[in-house]
Image: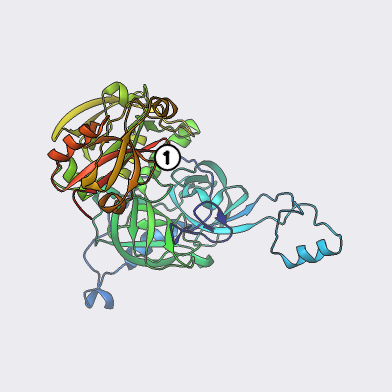
Amino acid sequence: MMSRLTFPVRRAGVAFVATLALVGCGRVTDHAAGPVATAPAQQPLPVSPGTTAAAARGLPDFTELVSAYGPAVVNVTVVERGRAVNADTDAPDDPLHDFLRRFGAQPRGDQPPARGEGSGFIVAPDGTILTNAHVVADASEVTVRLTDRREFTAKVVGVDQRTDVAVIKIDGKNLPTVRIGDPTKLRPGEWVVAIGSPFGFENSVTAGIVSATSRSLPDGQYTPFIQTDAAVNPGNSGGPLFNMAGEVVGINSQIYSRTGGFMGISFAIPIDIAINVRDQLVKNGRVQRGRIGVLIQDVGQQLADSFGLDRPRGALVSQVENAGPAAKAGLKPGDVILSVNGQSIERSGQLSAAISQLHPGASAELEVWRDRASRKISVDIAELKEGRVARGGGEEGKRGGAKLGLSLRPLSPAEKRAVGIDGGLLVEEVEGAALAADVKTGDIIIGANGQKVLSVDDLEAQLEKSKRSVALLVNRAGTTIFIPVKIGGG
């Protein structure tokens, strides 16, 4: 089935994004299941090529992998719950709908149930199956078909929309299963294989290479996606992504496309995240996620220069929630989080994923870059509540005057009260380097290079210490963001 950024498109799935579209490559389903078989009696498949003609020519050979684990990949067919028709709002582009309205007839009753297809894979011999949440969402019936053409009615055990992972269960014994691998060991350029049911063609096999790991996508802040160029199309959603050892390293979930069809970029959910979700759904019926109460952003070259980092890396803290775990631990806007419990953080999306997988009530050791030096900070993990938004406490910021192409003035007492901050510089005019960096009229500069800015003098002092660029902390319509600005020009 397919789902655009904000709404599902029925039938087989993929997903479109940004100016293009993220398309879910299957349908959503609730999930839960028993323990995943990490390695039944099977041994890892040999990485060395076999004796096929392809291998003789030095090409990768996937025949043993497909033979061993293809039977554990299933086709998932769903029937959605019907819904009542609203004659005024439903099916506005349906010619029959328009015809009936012209002659005074109003369509009534329930719509025929929508149908869709996706993929899944068996992770335990008792019939526990992982698939995408968007494959079985709102399903009234879920049918699983094996490669030997046996069909089973499946129960939706649990669904986690945030990660797009679902667990379903069929009644079976001694069913074929996949082996679970370690996605953290994946490297760009490595061969991977996708098996699924694109357009209903069961057990179709496509291959490609890993393009990137820990890829951030809109609305995917808790999932560092694996990007590949293995062909993924509607109906592939929920199917497994294998490495060359025959281990599942991901669940195929979305594509990047202008048309809704495959264009060479697909994304998979790392299997370790999916297993964590499955275990929680089976045990607790819901997924608990950790949080520390910060808003973060990526660190580009100019921000790295501004904060004295050796290269762009880490997650830059732009806002800290009042009285939240991060504030209590002493984290501040302008801090760059470089690692969590020894796990390196290269991009902001990795921090969200790492923190979300920690158990509420535990503590984590963060490596933080502040004042051009590294330090360790311990923070307690709280539980992420749905709909929670971090609200800013005291922030530090950045600023610039003529050197940056800005006309500034201090906030008046009334403006401070209205915005809820203790000071800053209001941007009245923008040109030059600041305009190129996307500073806007009406922004309030509250910090520079991690230091609070209450006056133009404060800003100028930070500019004197900066070399090529300055990192301005800006309050824009109640949200704080860091904006790197080159000094003295575009």
User: Is residue 91 rendered to the left or right of residue 444?
Assistant: right
> Residue 34 falls in which quadrant of the image?
top left
Q: Nearer the viewer, residue 334 or 193?
A: 334
**Way the structure is coloured:** rainbow
Q: Nearer the viewer, residue 280 or 227?
A: 227
Q: Is residue 7 visible?
A: yes
Where residue 73 appears, x then y in whole percent?
45, 57
> Residue 112 falls in which quadrant of the image?
bottom right
Figure label count: 1
Q: Identify whether 99 is placed above or below 187.
A: below
Q: Quadrant of the C terminus?
A: bottom left
Where residue 377 appears, x then y in whole percent?
22, 26
Q: Residue at x 30, y 43 (%)?
A: 407
SS type, badge 1: helix
Q: Residue at x 75, y 53 (%)?
A: 88
Q: Is residue 182 visible?
A: no
User: Is residue 365 rendered to the left or right of residue 127?
Assistant: left
Q: Residue at x 52, y 45 (%)?
A: 169
Q: Residue at x 38, y 54 (%)?
A: 268
Where residue 314 appears, x then y in whole percent?
23, 42
Q: Amino acid at mark 1?
A: Val
- Residue assigned mark 1: 277
Q: Quadrant of the N terminus?
A: bottom right
Circle 1 crowding by C-alpha within 10 Å: few under 14, some 14–19, many from 20: many
Where residue 463 appears, x then y in whole percent?
17, 40
Q: Identify whether 242 is placed above or below 385.
A: below
User: Is residue 212 rendered to the left or right of residue 286?
Assistant: left
